[in-house]
Amino acid sequence: MSIAQVDSPAEPETAVSRGTPAVIRLLVLATFVVILNETIMINAIPRLMGALHITEQTAQWLSTAFMLTMAAVIPITGWFLQRVSTRSAYATAMGLFLLGTALAAVAPSFEVLLGARIVQACGTAVMMPLLMTTLMQVVPESERGRVMGNVSLAISVAPAMGPTVSGVILQFGSWRLLFAVVLPIAAIITWSGLKQLKNVGETQVSAIDWLSVVTSAVGFGGLVYGLSRFEGGDVRVAAAIVGGGLAAIAVFVVRQMSLQKRGVPLMDLRTLRHRTYTVALILMAVSFMAMLGSMILLPLYLQNVRELSPLETGLLVMPGGLAMGLLGPPVGRLFDRFGGRVLVIPGAIGIALALAGFTQVTMTMPYWQLLALHALLMVSLAATFTPVFTLGLGAVPPHLYSHGSSILSTLQQVAAAFGTALVITVMSARADALRSAGVAEALADLDGMRLAFVIGAVLSVAVVVTAVLLPARADGTAEPAGPVH
């Protein structure tokens, strides 16, 4: 495998030892806008239904297609980020995002809007792995916690701000404003980034294996789609699609093991030989399932049971999201000083306590209690995610950073889809059974939500158990735990 330089010469990996590197600041800003746009659609569904004359199920495809695209594209990013320069990857990601945003702003029909969201998702799928891979390359190990904390500030505040920002914008005009406001901001960030961004690391030129691309897209995309079909769809059809997705993933894994012998895998599974990375993956996946489940359930409870408006709902959950983001830098500094265990174990316990508290929601639970439980959940997640990401990626050797971040991001999408499908299926089944037994609709919905929160609380116990297995520090030079041929 030959090494080739693309564009301008790359900076040395240890070029920066103080402060957050400029390249990271630029990528964080771009990622913030991308993630904000992902959640800004949440409150627009009713407006879209009326404007485009579509059903709620059809409108939900704007979110489902986004997740599907992310799940299908992210596995390819490990190969892509090794093959192209930092500037080329950034230009590709932001170019696709700008194109999708511009198309969405002028979309004359639902079909065009759906296509625009898919184009946006392709750009988004590249940004997070690009940010994480570049961070691991340019930041010395002793400062990764602090810098990762700054990164988490941006990417945690964005989802919290999305629903609130969209609620405010929708007060002033149509759903098109959501894209029209984002477009010039993203354009300025793209122009600024291309003007200042320098290449980091070296590129590796290798051919792409199309069988891997197809089985990856069919497998991970099919799995996420199948899981989304559990939400009010035919369970047997959904199970069949999930089974097909898992079968394609099995073929993909076998193919990667074969390609690894020649040193040209699309997704290098040798990252899984590193025990700390694998434990971090499991902890992150289960945490995401619990977190996404609660993030879906709480707005449903506040709007359907407590009858709050989307804007009021966004304002109530915003303090927790802001707290999660603002705690990122201090959590990062604590990680650099004391290691991960002193943060991850209390964080995992806090997640379990918050989700246990949500199982007790009633028709009249005071809003300050709901706010406090949500804030506890977000703060606990802040104490968990920054150390887990840093420990996990720090445990793999530098040449596998892009593959490690690609696997991490792919699993996030699958875990999000699984967590969402699980809680919605449990909630709907319980509520339907109670309604059939003559229970009032609001009480049936409430009881269904409480049972779904119980599922999240049970998952959080697994988070606590896994947290105990993580070391205080990552050892990127350690020998792998076992063979993955």
Image (cartoon, grey):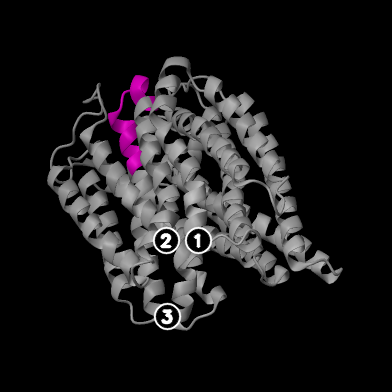
To which residue does mark 2 refer?
167
Disc 2 crowd rating (10 Å Cα; few below 14, some 14-19, many 20+) is many
The label on residue 51 is 3
- Quarter of the N terminus within the rendering: top left
To which residue does mark 1 refer?
310
Q: Is residue 443 above or below residue 454?
A: below
Q: Is residue 2 above or below residue 331?
A: below
Residue 325, by quadrant, is top left
Which callout, 2 or 1, points at the residue further toward the start of the chain? Answer: 2
Residue type at numbered disc 2 = Gly
Which callout, 2 or 3, points at the residue further toward the start of the chain? Answer: 3
Task: Measure the C-alpha gap from mark 2 to mark 1.
Answer: 6 Å
Which callout, 1 or 3, points at the residue further toward the start of the chain? Answer: 3
Which residue is drawn at the image coordinates 25% and 28% (left, top)? Answer: 13
Disc 1 crowd rating (10 Å Cα; few below 14, some 14-19, many 20+) is many
Residue range (magenta): 131-145
User: In screen coordinates, is 159 left or right of 242?
Assistant: left
Task: Measure the C-alpha gap from mark 2 to mark 3.
Answer: 17 Å
Q: Nearer the viewer, residue 214 or 158?
A: 158
Circles 2, 3 touching at the beta carbon (< 8 Å)? no
Residue 279, by quadrant, is top right
